[in-house]
Structures are given as structure tokens and as C-alpha cells.
Image (cartoon, rainbow, N blue to C red):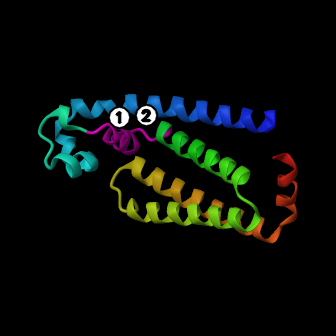
Amino acid sequence: MSVKYWSQVGVGLLVFGFSSLFSWYEGSALLDNPWEWKYSTPFSQMVHGTVSMGEKIVEVDFFVYAAKFSPLFPSIMLLSASYLLVLFGYRLFKHPVFSLYLCMFGIMYLLISATIASSPTTGGDILFWLFVSNGLFLIMLAIFFHFSPSLMKGQSNQA
């Protein structure tokens, strides 16, 4: 595999890793705000029921809190994960399957955006529009690759 591909994967993983660490750090402020536990701990409530102590908070809820109140690093995390998904999909799948792969992730992003559409926070609104734009972009990219099969022909020579 080419150096160009692996350098893109490396940079994507570094950006994803650092943005995840910063998001986790920003979300750890949830421990200091017990009045927010009822609204920002959906995963902890699924696992433990009502959250009454900080020790019962599941780590994923820190990302939920960060996304609601400081969405910069969760947004970077989403964009880098999307980039890595497209990069891996382009390398793994052939022409018709790759278009379907992109379309599937685009639809998944649109469905996620529908679940957070009524968020009362600014961070929720930002993530809503980020999911919508990402989903539409992936669907348009799928259509572009579907109708331009010549772009995928060079892929078989790279492997």
C-alpha cells in the first residue's frame, strides 16, 4: 500500500485521537454539574437507571456533555472519523459497493441528525447541521462515484 494512503490514515487517526482526548476532557466537567446529570447522561441512565453519583457516569456521556456545551472538539472528531470512513471504504470496496457504502453512511448521518434536531443547546444545533451537511455530502459523493466509474478504475492498480 502506498505511503500517501498511510500518511492520510496516520494524520486522520492523530486528529481523531487528539480531538477525542480534548472532548473527553471538556466533557469531564459533567462531574462538577450534578444538576445536568438528568439531561446529559443518556448512556448512564440506560446502564444504571437514575444517576445519583458521579461514579455511575459512563465515559461516553462525557462526549455527550462536551457535544452539548463545547462542540468544537466533538465536531473535529466527527469530521476526522468521517474522513477515515471514506478513506477506508475507498480502499476496501470496489465501485458499486463503495457508492452504496457512502450512501449508507450518509443516510445514517441524516438519521442521527433527526434524533438531535430538537436540541435546546447551541452545541446540539451545531452538531445537527454538521450531521446534515456531512450526510448530504456523503450522499452526493456516492452519486458522483456511481456516475463516474472511471474514478474507481485506478483503485485496482494501487492495491
Where residue 121 appears, as percent x and y from the top left, is 35, 50
Q: Is residue 4 above or below residue 45?
A: above
Which residue is found at the position 43% from the left and 54% from the top?
Answer: 125
Taken as a whole, is the magenta stretch helix, strand or loop?
Answer: helix
Q: Is residue 112 magenta?
A: no
Which residue was labeled with disc 2? 23
Q: Amino acid at mark 1?
A: Gly
Task: Tell me if 95 is positioned left or right of 120 in this view.
Answer: right
Q: Amino acid at mark 2?
A: Ser
Task: Tell me if 26 is positioned left or right of 73 in this view.
Answer: left
Viewer-proximal residue among 68 and 141? 141
Q: Residues within 10 Å of mark 2 (few under 14, many from 20)?
A: many
**Could you say which disc has been placed on residue 27 in the image?**
1
Where residue 26 appears, as percent x and y from the top left, is 38, 31
Where residue 18 appears, as percent x and y from the top left, is 52, 29
Which residue is found at the position 67% from the left and 53% from the top?
Answer: 89
Which residues, given as a range, are shown in magenta?
Answer: 58-72
The reply to whether callout 1 and callout 2 are in contact (CB within 8 Å) is yes
Task: Tell me if 30 is positioned left or right of 68 in this view.
Answer: left
Q: CA distance from mark 1 to mark 2?
A: 6 Å
Which residue is found at the position 40% from the left and 43% from the top?
Answer: 67
